[in-house]
Image: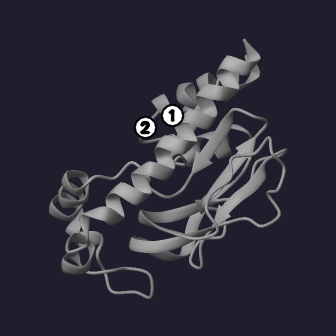
Amino acid sequence: MSVNDEAAYPWLVQEKEFIRQAIAAGKPMLGICLGGQLIANALGAEVYPSAVKEIGWFPITGEANSTDLDLFQFPPSTEVFHWHGETFDLPPGAELIASSEACQHQAFQIGRSVIGLQCHLETTPTAAQALVDNCADELIPGPFVQDAATILIVDQTRFATMNAVLVQLMEYLHHQVVSQA
């Protein structure tokens, strides 16, 4: 499914309008993968197929130019879970806050409380297993596509480290909401 599939999924039109209204009203928002693509597209950015699919465990890099303390700070490098074949341009006013070798736009931020992610910081071992079980047809060999065994045989601390970044991001967004109140 793509954010561009409005003919097949007409509800996407309403979803994008809801996103625009929520952002205009100053509501905090976090979009993950399709959600990040929806935020980007709702705000006027293009979403299109990536040059390569990115599926499996690959590092993202926190952007060195994101020294603005109002922006969420990703670690300089952290290995995270990916499962995507599309990417997005940055919407107007967005700051790039993380990238990867396969996908330049891994994370962006607009203002203090809107963040879009391409990667999946929320993934658990159960979720990774479900993706492999239900979407194995997407594991077509490529430079940034790992096989099922490689995806699943990771040390459990890798999930915990990645999930901790998500917790930090959620705490950051919570702080932004509290400080605006």
Location of residue 75 in the rendering, given as x and y in whole percent from the top left corner = 61, 62
- Asked whether 2 or 165 is in front, the reply is 165
Q: What coloring was used for the rendering?
A: one colour
Q: Residue at x 61, y 46 (%)?
A: 116
Secondary structure type for disc 1: helix
Horizontal relation, residue 89 to residue 174: left or right: right
**Residue that numbered label 1 is attached to:** 12
Q: Residue 79 location in percent, x, y? A: 46, 70
Mark 1, Cα crowd under 10 Å, few <14 / some 14-19 / many 20+, is some
The location of residue 70, given as percent across then percent down, is 80, 40
The local secondary structure at tag 2 comes to loop
Comparing 102 with 76, the one in front is 76
Q: Residues within 10 Å of mark 2 (few under 14, many from 20)?
A: few
Find residue 18 and report its image quarter: top right
Residue type at tag 2: Tyr
Is residue 2 at least partly visible in the picture? no
Residue 163, placed above or below residue 137: above
Most extreme residue toward the top, as rendered?
181
Instruction: Name the residue rendered at 44%, 81% in the picture.
Output: 144
Q: Say if 174 sits above or below 109 in the image.
A: above
* Residue 174 in picture, x, y percent from top left: 59, 27
Compared across the picture, whether 129 is left or right of 39 comes to left
Q: Residue at x 53, y 36 (%)?
A: 170
> Badge 2 is on which residue?
9
In this picture, residue 62 sits left or right of residue 53: right
Q: Is residue 95 above or below residue 133?
A: above
Q: Which residue is drawn at the image coordinates 56% and 37% (left, top)? A: 30
| Labels in figure, total | 2
Q: Residues at badges 1 and 2 in contact (C-beta under 8 Å)?
A: yes
Q: Is residue 8 visible?
A: yes
Q: What amino acid is found at the position of numbered circle 1 in the picture?
A: Leu
From the image, which quarter does the C terminus lie in? top right
